[in-house]
Amino acid sequence: MSRVSVGVLMGALVGLLAACGGDSEGRQGEAGPGRATRALSEGELDRAALTASEAEGFSVERVDAETIEFATREAADKPACQPLAEASALVAYGPKAKAEAYRVYKATKDDLSVHGITAHLMSYGEDEAKAKLRRVRAAVKACSGGFAVGGDGEDGVRYSAIRPLAGVEAGSEVVAYRLAVELPGGRSMPHTYVVARSGPLVVAYEGVDAVRSKAVDVPEAMVVRQIAKLEKTAS
């Protein structure tokens, strides 16, 4: 597999966020009845993704997997860190989802249009969904000292300052963490991740400010509403 440099990774992310525009989807239901009881098709996941009217303060753009997965599946230098490496490259890690959908949410008050949150909605068998959260949780614990992807040269990417965050109460379980992508000149860019599961359904968020290198929180309300909408769709 070809390697992806920090410059390519960050440049693609800036381009993706800058290209995303407003929401063209209508408002849908908000309240969920409880834990999701079945897997969803790609069309159902697509319809269950939050719209701009449901994600207050954000515009939303529907994107496909070919657009969002701009990085290849590089191996982490520490195998235990592979779930974090692949999540940071915006690719699905572990078993392939039976169905998936992507959205990019852009803060409407951000003049630079680079304060963005990517949402990856996935449908699995329940055992696979549980295993995904278990692997992420274990990787956050095992990789606090950091890890590298793509070697130590200029084409490599190094991640550091990995720490768990308090997770919002939603669905069956939630794992939240933050890490830093090390940049040239001793700088770093924080990335925030929230992975939530309800039954066989998983939604993974990445929050990043690709220009100012400031930490971006994934709003709790966004996670709660998205899980509730998935649960309602799967009821």
Image (cartoon, helix red, strand yellow):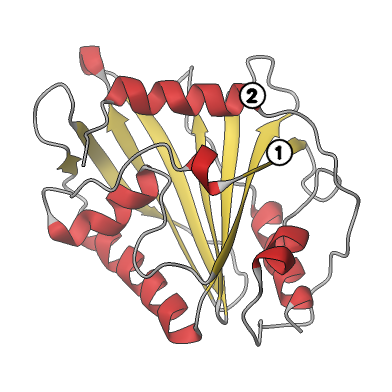
Number of residues whose C-alpha sits closer than 10 Å to that of mark 2, classed few (under 14), some (14–19) or many (20 or more): few
Q: Is residue 54 left or right of residue 86?
A: right
Considering every residue shown, the one lying at the far top of the view is 185
Q: Which mark is residue 147?
A: none
Residue 139: image x %, image y %? 26, 61
Residue placed most toward the observer, 22 or 136: 22
Q: Is residue 230 left or right of residue 170?
A: right
Residue 178 appears in view: no
Q: Against 51, is 176 above or below?
A: below
Quadrant, the N terminus: top left
What residue did someone put label 1 on? 61
Q: Amino acid at mark 2?
A: Ala
Number of residues whose C-alpha sits closer than 10 Å to that of mark 1, classed few (under 14), some (14–19) or many (20 or more): many
Quadrant, the C terminus: bottom right
Q: Residue at x 33, y 50 (%)?
A: 86
Picture quadrant of residue 89: top left
What residue did someone put label 2 on? 19
Q: Residue at x 53, y 48 (%)?
A: 65
Picture quadrant of residue 134: bottom left
Q: Against 47, is 39 above or below?
A: below
**Mark 1 and 2 residues: CB-CB less than 8 Å, in contact?**
yes
Residue 4 appears in view: yes
Q: Against 209, is 167 above or below?
A: below
Residue 178: image x %, image y %? 39, 45
Q: Amino acid at mark 1?
A: Glu
Residue 227: image x %, image y %? 67, 67
Q: Is residue 6 left or right of residue 10?
A: left
Tell which circle, 1 or 2, labels the residue nearer the N-terminal end.
2
Distance Cα–Cα, label 1 vs label 2: 9 Å
Q: Against 158, is 163 above or below?
A: below
Q: Is residue 52 left or right of residue 72?
A: right
Residue placed most toward the observer, 54 or 4: 4
